[in-house]
Amino acid sequence: MFASDVLIAQNIGFFIIAAVMVAGALRVVTTSNVVHAALWLVVVLAGAAAQYVLLAAEFVAVTQVLVYIGAVMVLFLFGTMLTRARIGAESDLNNKNWFAGLAVALTLLAAMLIALRDGFGDEKLPTDAPLVSTQMLSDQIFGPYLLPFWALSFVLLAAVIGAIVLARRD
Amino acid sequence: MNTVSLIIAEVPYWGQSLLRVLGGLVAVLLPAGTIVYLFLFKMMSFMQSRLGPMEAGPYGSMQLFAEVGKWLQKEDIYPARADKFIFKLAPLIVLASTFLLVAVVPFGPDAWFTNFEAGIFYALAVSSVSVLGILIAGWSSANKYSLLGGLRAAGQLIAYELPMVLAVIGVVIQAGTMNLQGIVLAQNSGSMFGFDGLGNPYVLTQFVGFVIFMISVQAELTQAPFDMPIAESELVSGYMTEYSGFRFLIFFIGEFATAGVFAMIASVLFLGGWAVPFSWFGWTTMDSIDNWMNFAGPLILFTKMMAVTFLVMWVRFSYPRLREDQLQRFAWKVLIPISLVNIMFTAILKVAF
C-alpha cells in the first residue's frame, strides 16, 4: 500500500467503515447480551451496505439494508425477544468450545484472503468505471444468469415449504 | 441547467450539504407540525363535534408550541430495570429513518436532496429500519406491555411492508424506472388515449396499487384501524408506555413526520409529484421546465401531501381497531394476492401496448 493510495477519499472512507465493522463484529461475539449482540450485528451489516455504496453498487447496498437490516435482523430480534431475551448480562451465552469457532473463523479468513489475492492480485478497479445501473444488473440476472437465479429461487422455495411443514403440528 | 442550479453550483460542497440538512429539517418538521395541528387537533375535534384547542393563539394555532414546551420541561424518566443506552437510542433510530426517507423525495426539477437511481427502492428499504427502533424500544423498557407492543409492531410492519413493495412494483413497471424524478416525468409527460391535459397520473391506471399502497401506509404508520402496537385499551400505550418528556416527543414527531413523508412518496408515485401536466406549459423534457417550478414544485407537492394525509387521517378517525389475527390475515390472504395479480396484469398490459 502506497501513500498515494491511502489519500483517496474512497480509501479513507473504506478504512473508517472497515474499522467500525471489525469492532462491531468483535462486540457481536464478546457482548454478554443477546439483543446487544444482534444490534452490533446490525452495525456490521450496515457497514457492509456502506461499503457497497463506496463501490457505487447502490442497488446491492439498498438490497442489503432492505433484506438484512429490515427483515432478517428484525425477525431475529423478534424471535429472541419472544423466547428468551433478558435485560442485562447473561452468563451462559458462551459455549465451552468457542476456541474451535475461532479456528474455523481464522481458516475461513485465510481462505478468502488467498482466494482474493489469487483471483485479482494487484488489479485495481478502474477509476472511471461506468456506473452499473439497476437495469444493467437486472439484464444480467434475467439474461445470462437466469438458470442459477431460478435454481436459487427453487432452493429458497423448498426451504420455505420445509419450514412451514416443520412448524405446523397438524 | 437553469438559474437555480447555476446559483447552487457556486456554493461550496459544505455549504450545499448544510443547505440540504436545513432543507431536510424543514421538509420533515413543517409537514409534521401542520398535520398535527390541522388534522390531529382540529379535524378530529370537528369530526367528534367539539372545538379542539382554542386557548393558545387564534383558534388554538399556537397549541403546538405550548405542547412542545410542556414536553421539553418534563423530567427525563427511565425505568430502573431498563437497558438505559438502548432505551435512549430507540427513538433516535425511528427519527433517523424518517430523515433518511425524506432524502429521496423530489420537490422540483432541480430541488431535490439526492437524485438516487434506485430512489423508490431506497425509500422502501430505509422505512423498514424504523421497525428496529420500535422493537428495541419495547424490549429495553423492561415492561410486559411495552414488549408486547414492540412485538406487535414488528409483526405488523413486516407483514405490511410486503404489499407496499408489491404495490409499488406496478408503478415501477409502468414508469420503467425506479428513480422518483423519472416516475414524476413519466406521469406528467404521459397521455391517456391521446389526451394529455391531465398527464397520466398513476392513481387512475394503477388504482388497485394506490389502494393497496394507502392501506399499507396506514398500517406502517400504525394509525387506526391498524394501531394494535399502541392499543391503549389493551397495552397502555404499547412500546411508548415508558417514554416521557422529549423522548416521547421524538416518537410523536417521528410518527407524524413519517406520515407526511409517506404521503409525499404516495403523491410522487400516484399523483404526479411536484409537477403539473407538462402539456399545460408546453414542456417536454426535464430540461425544458421553467425555473419557477423549483419554487412552485414544493408547494404543489405539499398540497398533494395534505390531500393524501387527509385520507389517512379520515380513515384513522372513522374506523375502530382491527383484531391482531384479522390484521395478519388481511395482509397475507387479501392484500398480497391482489397485489401479485396487479403486477401480473400491469406487466401483461405493459408488454401488450
Image (spheres, coloured by chain):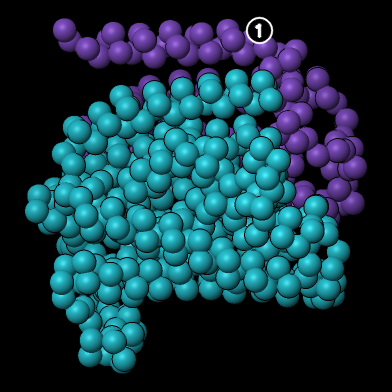
Residue at the image position 62 percent from the left and 32 percent from the top: B173
Who's purple, chain-wise? A
Using the image as rendered, state which of residue B300 and residue A41 is in the foreground: B300
Q: Quadrant of the N terminus of chain B?
A: bottom right
Q: Locate residue B22, reporting x and y percent.
A: 59, 74
What kind of element bears circle 1?
helix
Q: Quadrant of the C terminus of chain B?
A: top right
Crowding around mark 1 (Cα neighbors within 10 Å: few <14, some 14 to 19, many 20+) is: few
Residue at the image position 77 percent from the left and 50 percent from the top: A10
Residue at the image position 16 percent from the left and 7 percent from the top: A170
Q: Locate residue B127, reporting x and y percent.
A: 47, 48
Residue at the image position 50 percent from the left and 9 percent from the top: A155
Q: Locate residue B14, reporting x and y percent.
A: 73, 72
Using the image as rendered, state which of residue A42 and residue B100 is in the foreground: B100
Q: Locate residue B161, reporting x and y percent.
A: 41, 38
Q: Amino acid at mark 1?
A: Leu
Q: Is residue A5 visible?
A: yes
Q: Which residue is mark 1?
A: A147
Chain B image colour: cyan
Residue B328 occupies quadrant: top left
Chain under label 1?
A: A
